[in-house]
Amino acid sequence: MTLPAADDKRAVVEAMFDRIAPRYDLMNRLMTFGIDRGWRRRAIAALGLRPGERVLDLACGSGDLAAAARATGARVVGIDFSAGMLRQARTRRLDCGLVRADALALPFADASIDAVVSGFALRNFADLAAALAESARVLRCDGRLALLEVDRPASTLLRWGHAIYFRRVVPFIGALLSERDAYAYLPESTVYLPDETALREILVAAGFRTIRKRSLLGGAAQLVTARRAEVAAAGSAAPKGEGATRMGAAQRGALHA
């Protein structure tokens, strides 16, 4: 399939997720044989959350990560730009806030969040560097970041098998149960992902340190963790105070409920 041009990406991706929202959880379970649940638990465990901490689930989708974070006793708010995905999340009656918002302009004050988690969303952001800089802006000093994303196995044999499954089987299952084009986009969209070195450079420029990558399932997926550096050491994070005006009463209530 033809990937959307940069100027059209946000609108195309938003519309796509609105359409596939009703079958999103089912497709995730089938595509990964349920293994993705363990990956999400591992991402939350990597954050070392404590009861009462403030957690942002970035591009929360149907709320799997938000639910796992809430189970630790943390206060959680999930944001997504897809109204369809948020409707799906609300059907689960999650005990957390759900806000429609853009990852490039988060509606939260500077240093107001203890941890940010995101699952399989990096390739969908219109501007990955800007999204990570916004995450750094809202995180307090030494706040934690955990990013789950697909990856490319290092082994030639695993890479071959992974490519066959990802590019042939997944779109076929998607055509049967949801939408073929959306699940053809999934493997093709990996071209938006920077390699390990480039992603590390983006994270450092955004204001992160202590960056670590863990390979999952032979390299089929990756878990990247980092910590927010001191504000003075941040590279391209937004200036202090810029984001404070973006947080209205509804968002404050969602975060502190």
Image (spheres, rainbow, N blue to C red):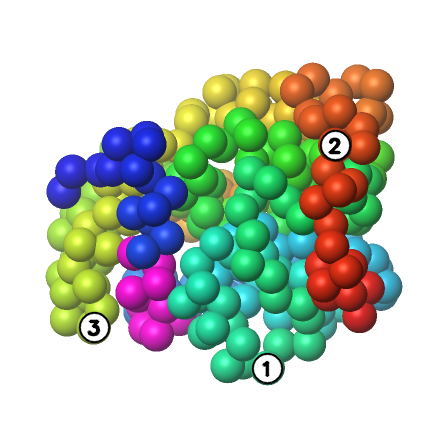
- Disc 1 marks which residue? 93
Percent coordinates x, y for residue 196 in the rendering: 48, 26
Nearer mark to the viewer, of 2 and 1: 2
**Quarter-wise, where is residue 93 in the image?**
bottom right
In this view of the protein, which residue sits in the foreground, 124 or 166? 124
Q: Is residue 205 magenta?
A: no
Visible residue check, residue 76: no
Could you tell me the amino acid type at mark 2? Answer: Glu
Question: What is the magenta range?
Answer: 16-27
Residue shown at 66% from the left, 39% from the top: 135
Residue shown at 47% from the left, 73% from the top: 87
What numbered label is drawn on residue 242? 2
Percent coordinates x, y for residue 64 in the rendering: 54, 67
Percent coordinates x, y for residue 240 in the rendering: 80, 28
**Residues under labels 1 and 3: Cα distance?**
24 Å
**Quarter-wise, where is residue 218 in the image?**
top left
Q: Which quadrant, please, contains the C terminus? A: bottom right
What numbered label is drawn on residue 45? none
**Quarter-wise, where is residue 144 in the image?**
top right
- Say whether residue 33 is left or right of residue 239: left
In this view of the protein, which residue sits in the foreground, 251 or 173? 251
* Badge 3 density bin: few <14, some 14–19, many ≥20, Cα 10 Å: some
N-terminal of the pair, mark 3 or mark 2, is 3
Q: Is residue 206 above or below residue 75?
A: above
